[in-house]
Amino acid sequence: MKLPVIYTLVLLTLSGTVFAGSLFTIPGVSAQATDSYIIVYRAEDHVVAFGLESERTGSILDTGAVDLDAYALVTTRNDNGILQATELGEVVYRNDRTLIVRLLRPLRGNFLRSDIFMVQPLRETRAPFTPLPLPVTREYDDTVAEITALVSEDSLISITTNYQSYLTRYSNTDGFDTACEWSNDRFTSYGLDSEIKHFSMLGYDSQNVVATQTGTVNPVQYWIICGHLDSISPYTQTDAPGADDNGSGSAAVMEAARIMSQYDFEYTVLYILWGGEEQGLYGSEHFADSAAAAGSDILGVVNLDMIFYGPASEDQAWLHYNTASTGLGLAFDAISDTYVPALDKIVASSPVSASDHASFWNAGYAAMLSIEKGVWSNPHYHQTTDIMSNYLQYFPFGTNMAKAAIATVAALAVPVGTGIEGETSFVNAEMISMGLVTNPVNTSASLNVSIPSTGTLDLNLYDISGREIHSISEILPGGSSIMDIDVSDLSPGMYLMKLEFNGESLTSRMIVTE
């Protein structure tokens, strides 16, 4: 991506020629782009910027680059990936598994190494640093429960096996084109308005498949459930079956369309399969940038990428969301707890940008990734052994992963003509449990909690935008106890509760009434 025109003009004014920019850090997370620099990466407590270093307040990482084409954003699977990344160029920045590399030569095609998860161009990010609001008003919904129950393990396996049968779905192959055509026809058979949308990348044509289910109340506000359809292996043109990566996520999107197309929703739902993900998120970047330029009102994006690998101790959903997407992440956690309590989830401490949700972060939209926790250790990742038969032993983990995403999008899109059950909401985990005595609540809430041993229990209360509004820490004895929460000063609406004890956490919802 080239620098914006306004930035280039500033450089010309300052120097008379194109000025060589610097890569540098700015402490804190609130920095926004100016005429002198753009933001290219947001970490937990700082940002990385590119431009005139005169406005920097942090450390200089690199100098002398004319534009962002000189760099790549690299995600590694482990520390050895840092060494492999030096084949691309000099590592000038590291944040956990995320690296910025100054390239020895421009990116061309793929850089496949065993411990490199993804290589993508370094791009400008316009993600806001404050949480984006979510228009969520409902508690338990019978229709969402019905939709969730209709998710079929056999259907997921069948669709994934079909995608695998194309031998390769690398983005410039006939196999990928055929998979797109099959997907488009399948979406259309569900009564959806579906279209193959083309874009250019790396000198050739690729495509996304976009199916639309128009909302009955808010037709120009969109929820997106998506996954990338392309695949990769060391033998890109002939043998890249991509069952887990990412036939699994694509099958879940197709399953969502199969079921949800039979219901009406207040908001429009887009079911999207991306091309060009393995080469650097090109398909989702094209869509997200075009949507932002058009002012499209995308409320949130749930991205699924690898959801079938779940061996013992790693059979968890790994949720990645940035600060601006906190409300979406908490909603996913709470909604999946309600409708898919069997699925255990963890939140990434350092959210990765190595899948299509990041394109929407860059464009300023709320987005999140749900991925298998075992992704770093999956022996079939980007290999010819990424076939359906290697994942059958882990079901129903994959089915529960799909159910959680589908339940979330169905609940957020708001089914038409269904009611709310205002009964007790109860959530369980291995180590702790909690349940409201009544839900909805009025002036105070009594929370039943159970912990295995004496210790400090932390309770955080968030509004639906993800803003923390209340925090309690109490030392409680092991067993069952009651925690009282004063809600008399809260406005009516839905709130999210997060309970933490000894590294375990639970999220549930609370409705405050007049």
Image (spheres, rainbow, N blue to C red):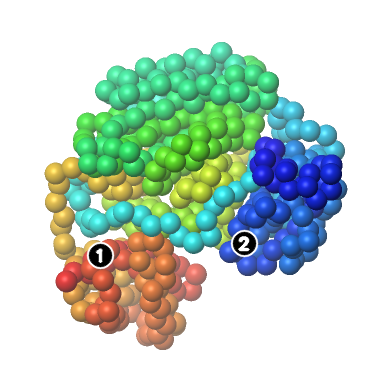
Mark 2 belongs to which amino acid?
Ala
Residue at x 18%, y 75% (from the top left corner): 442
Circle 1 SS class: strand
Q: On the image, numbered disc 1 is attached to which residue?
A: 493
Q: Is the residue marked by circle 1 packed among few (<14), some (14-19), or many (20+) residues within 10 Å?
A: some
Residue 397, how many percent across, how many down? 41, 44
Does 256 appear above or below 180? below
Q: Quadrant of residue 162?
A: top left
Rounded to the nearest whole Å, what is the CA distance between mark 1 and mark 2?
Answer: 31 Å
State the quadrant of the C terminus.
Answer: bottom left
Does 338 appear above or below 513? above
Q: On the image, numbered disc 2 is attached to which residue?
A: 31
Q: Is the residue marked by circle 2 packed among few (<14), some (14-19), or many (20+) residues within 10 Å?
A: some
Query: In this image, 349 relative to 99: left or right?
Result: left
Residue at x 28%, y 51% (from the top left corner): 339
Residue 189, how many percent across, how many down? 29, 19
Q: Name which of mark 1 and mark 2 comes first in the sequence.
A: 2
Residue at x 55%, y 42% (from the top left corner): 359
Residue 21, how many percent across, how many down? 79, 49
